Amino acid sequence: MYIPSAIKLHKASKTLELHYGSQSYSLSAEFLRVHSPSAEVQGHGKPILQTGKLHVGLSSIEPAGNYALKLCFDDGHDSGLFSWDYLHHLATHQEQLWADYLQALATAGKSRDPNESVVKLML
């Protein structure tokens, strides 16, 4: 199990900073929100693409026993428990997970921006 040695919530920059020994990672609230382990996002085995989360922030973090963090987002989402191992996975695979997410958005013709609609014209 990978347990962070330090955890810092930065509300202004909308990031969660995780330290593992000498390694540190900064995860954006948007990244964490679209990769929430909740059933709302994971869809009981078939993930549901999250869109329009560009401006989402973290309102609070709470320990969930000795095994996870409960992240509370300012869009009202607070049902995912991020286990220590899952947080470590997100931190260490952030670049590829983010690229995959952006590709899924593009493929679906969706946007990170809640105020933007993408229209594909078939010419």
Image (cartoon, grey):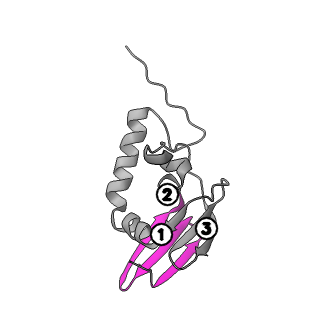
Tell me the amino acid under the disc marked 3.
Answer: Ala
Quadrant location, the C terminus:
top left
Tell me the amino acid under the disc marked 2.
Answer: Pro
- The segment highlighted magenta reads 5-29
Numbered disc in front, either 3 or 2: 2
Disc 1: which residue: 83
Which residue is more in the foreground, 51 or 3?
Answer: 3
Name the outermost residue toward the top.
Answer: 123
Residues marked 2 and 1 touching at CB (< 8 Å): yes
Q: Secondary structure at mark 3?
A: loop
3 or 2: tag closer to the N-terminus? 3
Crowding at mark 3 (Cα within 10 Å: few <14, some 14-19, many 20+):
few
Crowding at mark 2 (Cα within 10 Å: few <14, some 14-19, many 20+):
some
Which residue is more in the foreground, 38 or 105?
Answer: 38
Q: Is 52 within the magenta?
A: no
Disc 3: which residue: 12
